[in-house]
Image (tube, rainbow, N blue to C red):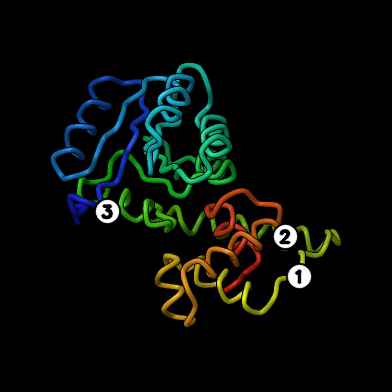
Amino acid sequence: MCPAADEQVRVLIVDDHPIWRNGVARDLTELGFSVVGTAGSGMQALRIAKAVQPDVVLLDLNLPDLPGSEVTRQLLTAHPAARVLVLSASAERQDVLDAVTAGASGYVLKSAELRELAEAVLATSAGRAVFTPGLAGLVLGEYRRLSAQRDRAGGPAAPALTSRETEVLRLVAKGLTYPQIAVRLGLSPRTVQNHVQNTLTKLQLSNKAQLVRYAIEEGVE
């Protein structure tokens, strides 16, 4: 479960409660993660992220200055390679959907055990979507509802993807990394990355988390 010493996941922890924030930082550090910074507000998180370039931002939604969804949007706009994993006490439907719509890769409740949190951070760093049990179904159900609603309203057709782009998109949505997709399809990782970038451009999306949400919404399986 712990990252190898030469493959440490760089984590920025954002929470307005110092005791909780520092406790999570200590626990993840002891498990082998590289905690590159902590922040108690959204604006502080944005400043620190610029300096430390984290792989994963572990983000509480309840911050004193900015909504967590807005922090997520700004973080991913400024640092598209980063991934946001929400760690919240709230399991409210709207909170979950707002976070995912803003670009969060996953949503874990603060009631999770440390082992679950560590596994979620690792999975998020690898590009997989991670949700506390029960929340994934909520997100999937909502996107299917919106998709059906759009179809009934005669919404615009999705941009056409090539068969290879669709194949790559399907594997991205399943949580495979670029190297894993490359092996599966007999391609180079660079070629896989190019297909993903072309797909992002066609769909007018900015990062892999949004691509996964698109695949869920469109039923790409």
Q: Is residue 152 left or right of residue 74?
A: right
| Circles 2, 1 touching at the beta carbon (< 8 Å) | yes
* Nearer-N-terminus badge (3/1): 3
Quick one: which residue is furthest to the top in this view? 65
Q: Earlier in the sequence, mark 3 or mark 2?
A: 3
Q: Amino acid at mark 3?
A: Glu
Instruction: Give the percent coordinates (x, y) of residue 191.
Output: 54, 70
The Cα atoms of the two marked residues, 3 and 1, are separated by 35 Å
Image quarter of residue 16? top left
The residue tagged 3 is 119
- Name the residue: 21% across, 40% down: 28
Residue 113 picture location, percent across and down: 22, 46
Provide the secondary structure element on which disc 1 rests.
Answer: loop
Task: Report the residue marked by disc 1.
Answer: 160
Q: Is residue 16 above or below residue 49?
A: above
User: Which amino acid, by three-letter code, is at mark 2?
Assistant: Lys
Helix, strand or loop under label 3: helix
Spatial CA distance of label 3 from label 2 is: 32 Å
